[in-house]
Amino acid sequence: MTDGFRVRTLTLRPGEAIDYRAAEWSGALVIVEQGELEVECVSGVRACFGEGSVLTFAGLELRRLHSTGSGCLVVTGLSREPVR
């Protein structure tokens, strides 16, 4: 956490995938810093986002996050931390 922000970085090798956990990405702006991110919805629908994409997962029913490019995927999530 830095100055009231939470930064989460995810790195996946080509072809790797992880289960999506909503609590880890809640309220975050998501930046595809390197590679290609494919999001898989519970319905089976998939969408790809390339390097430089900025998105949010809010309101989506996601199942998995995939690295579909030829290089490593690096995704960063930036969200506000509650004031304590």
Image: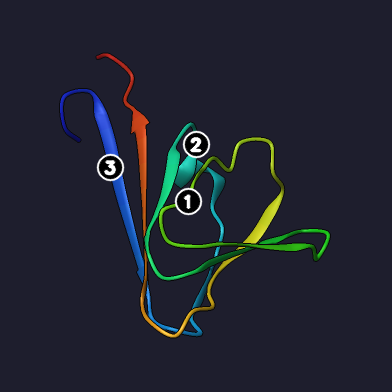
Q: Residue at x 47, y 51 (%)?
A: 53
Q: Where 83 falls versus 68 (above or below)?
A: above
Residue underneath mark 1: 53
User: Mark 2 vs mark 3: which is more N-terminal?
Assistant: 3
Q: Residue at x 83, y 59 (%)?
A: 43
Residue 70 located left or right of residue 19: left
Q: Quadrant of residue 32?
A: bottom left
Of label 1 and label 2, which has the lower sequence position? 2
Secondary structure type for disc 2:
loop
Q: Give the residue type at disc 2.
A: Ser
Earlier-in-chain disc, 1 versus 3: 3
Q: Residues within 10 Å of mark 3 (few under 14, many from 20)?
A: some
The dot on residue 7 is 3
Which quadrant does the C terminus fall into? top left
Provide the secondary structure element on which disc 3 rests: strand
Q: In the image, what residue type sits under mark 3?
A: Val
Name the amino acid type tagged 1.
Ser
Q: Secondary structure at mark 1?
A: loop
Q: Is 23 placed above or below 9 here?
A: above
Q: Is residue 19 above or below residue 26?
A: below
Query: Which residue sits at x=61%, y=36%?
Result: 58
Mark 2 closeness class: few <14, some 14–19, many ≥20 residues within 10 Å: some
Q: Is residue 7 left or right of residue 47?
A: left
Select label 1 or label 2 by which is in front.
1
- Viewer-proximal residue among 78 and 70: 70
* Quadrant of the snapshot with the N terminus: top left
Compared with 48, 8 (above or below) is above
In this picture the colour scheme is rainbow
Please give the label number shown on residue 20: none
Q: Are marks 1 and 3 in contact (CB under 8 Å)?
A: no
Query: What label does residue 26 carry, if any?
Result: 2
Instruction: Tell me where residue 18 appears, x and y as whole percent.
Output: 51, 70
